[in-house]
Structure formats: structure tokens, C-alpha cells
Amino acid sequence: MTIYQNGTITSEVSDFLLNCFVRSPSWKFWLSLPLSLLFLLAMGANSVLLITIWLEVCLHEPMYYLLSILSLLDIVVCLTVIPKVLAIFWFDLKSISFYACFLQMYIMNWFFAMESCTFMVMAYDRYVAICHPLRYPSIITDQFVAKAAIFILARNSIITMPIPILSSQLHYCGTNVIDNCICANMFVSRLSCNDVTISRIYQFVGGWTLLGSDLILIFLSYTLILRAVLRLKAEGAVAKALSTCASHFILILFFSTILLVFVLTHVVKKKVSPDVPVLLNVLHHVIPAALNPIVYGVRTQEIKQGIQRLLKKVC
């Protein structure tokens, strides 16, 4: 499409080309197999977890409903990003339409924010279970989970929506080549002919407000949990609680740290290869999704038994 601007004819971008790992093309070959396996693991593990919780009546409890929400978010994030990345690696299908690009951008921002918020709610669930066990049934109810789900959906959809809207309203009159495998806002907006200050400020403030507030509350919850656990007299109870909470906390830190490293490498891009933040960006969409159902689900005795019962029925 062409438009008139200041008396001259310029070309308006109608699609984008996702051109990733230009400086390290061999990475595509070496990454394609492990990325495919991680994708299959993420989809398979999360699907099994969802089916198990759905079919096993004994798992129809608030804690497992929260796990279901997390698994559903992981599945959507993987399906939004990884198939397109693999299509680029295998078939060199780099083209993505203008609107599909910004839709992908919105889903990524929205669902990552919802995942961070879900981690926060799950941390609160563990805090109540360990620090106030007698009040847990009256606080963490099905109604609580429903309200939490509405909050997760509403808060993050409203705050993240302006990011793709602001980016899509920019004027893209130059190159349409995105130096990434996905439509990350920072990579797309740099192609614009307009001033992108407002868009970048909003993404920075909004993103860190969401992630920062969630991390503070998560850290506070696990600090209180740790303090309560250390007061327990039974050694077996202490070890079990520490094992469960430590694995959860490490996974949350991994989810947040890899995103922080991606941002920092993008900021100091002159000192690192431009392909490094692209690699981190791709891995951030699949590794947490593959690990979440294992750490949160399979390591839970009730879910493990539920999976075993389902396998016996199938076999």
C-alpha cells in the first residue's frame, strides 16, 4: 500500500519478514531439534496435566485449578510462538502479515503478564496453606479461584492492550525486516518512521509495574513461608515444605531472570551478539512452559497418582 507524505509517495508496510539469527545461521539447524522436543514436551506435559485434573474428581480443588490456569497459559504461549519459529527454521517461511504480527505481540505480552500474576496467586495459595493451615479451606475456595481468574484476566488484558495498539498506530514506511524470530515490541517498533518514545516508555513502565509488583508479592509470600517452615519442629515436615517451595521459587526466578537477561542484553547490545537476545527471547517462550507442569504437577503426589490411574485406564 502507498500513501502520500509531505508531497512524496512512500510505501506502507503490509507484512513483515522475521529474519532471525542472520549472524549465526547455523544456530537454526542446531536449535531446531531441541526446540521441537521442548515444544512437544511442553504441549504434552501441560495437556496431560489438564486432562488429569479435569477427569480426576479428587483433584477438583482450588490449588489444582490454579495449576490448570498455568498450564492453559503455557499452551497458548507455545502455540502462538513456537510453530512459527520452527516454520522459519525448517521451511524459511519468514513472512507474517501486519495484523498477525501485532496479534502475536498482544498475546505474548498479555499471557506472560497473566502467567506472572498466576505465579503470584499460587505463591499466596502456598502461603495460606503453610502459614494458616486451619483457615486454608475457608480462604482458598472455588469462589476465590474464580475471582482470582477474573482479576488475572482483566488486569493484564487492560494494561497490556496499549502496547500493540501504540505500535500498530506507528507509521512503517521503511524496511519490513524484523531482526527476530517473533514480533517482539522492541524489535518491531524500531522499524517505525515515527517517534516511538511514548510506546517504549509505556512498555517499560507497564511491564515492570506488572512484573515488579508480582515479584515483590511472590518474594514476600515465600519469605513468610520460609520463616514459618523453620519454626516447625517435625523434621520431615520441614524437609517436605522446603523441597516443594524451593522448586516453585526457583522456577519463578528462572521465569523472571531469563526475561531480565533478555532486556539487559538488548540494552547493552553493543557488547553482546545481537543473536543472543533473540535466542533468549525464543527460549523464554518454551522452557518455562516445559518445566512448569513437571515442577508444579508431576512432583505433586496427588497428580502423579492421578496420571497413573489414567494410564491404567488407557492401557
Image: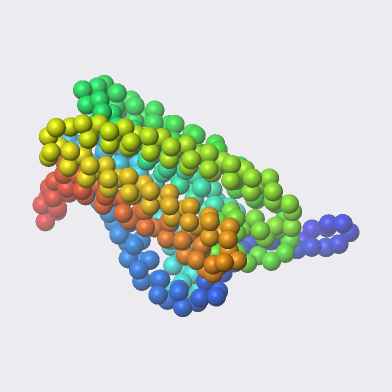
Q: Tell me where residue 24 appears, x and y as whole percent.
A: 51, 76
The color scheme shown is rainbow
Q: Tell me where residue 29 appears, x and y as whole percent.
A: 42, 76
**Left or right: residue 136 compared with residue 255:** left
Where 42 falls versus 235 (above or below)? below
**Left or right: residue 120 compared with residue 204:** left
Q: Residue at x 45, y 47 (%)?
A: 112
Q: Residue furthest bottom?
A: 26
Quadrant containing the C terminus is bottom left
Q: Residue at x 32, y 65 (%)?
A: 37
State which quadrant residue 2 falls in. bottom right
252 or 286, nearer to the observer = 252
State which quadrant residue 241 falls in. top left
Q: Tell me where residue 142 appears, x and y as whole percent.
A: 30, 28
Q: Residue at x 29, y 56 (%)?
A: 44
State which quadrant residue 192 falls in. bottom right
Q: Residue at x 38, y 66 (%)?
A: 35
28 or 280, nearer to the observer = 280
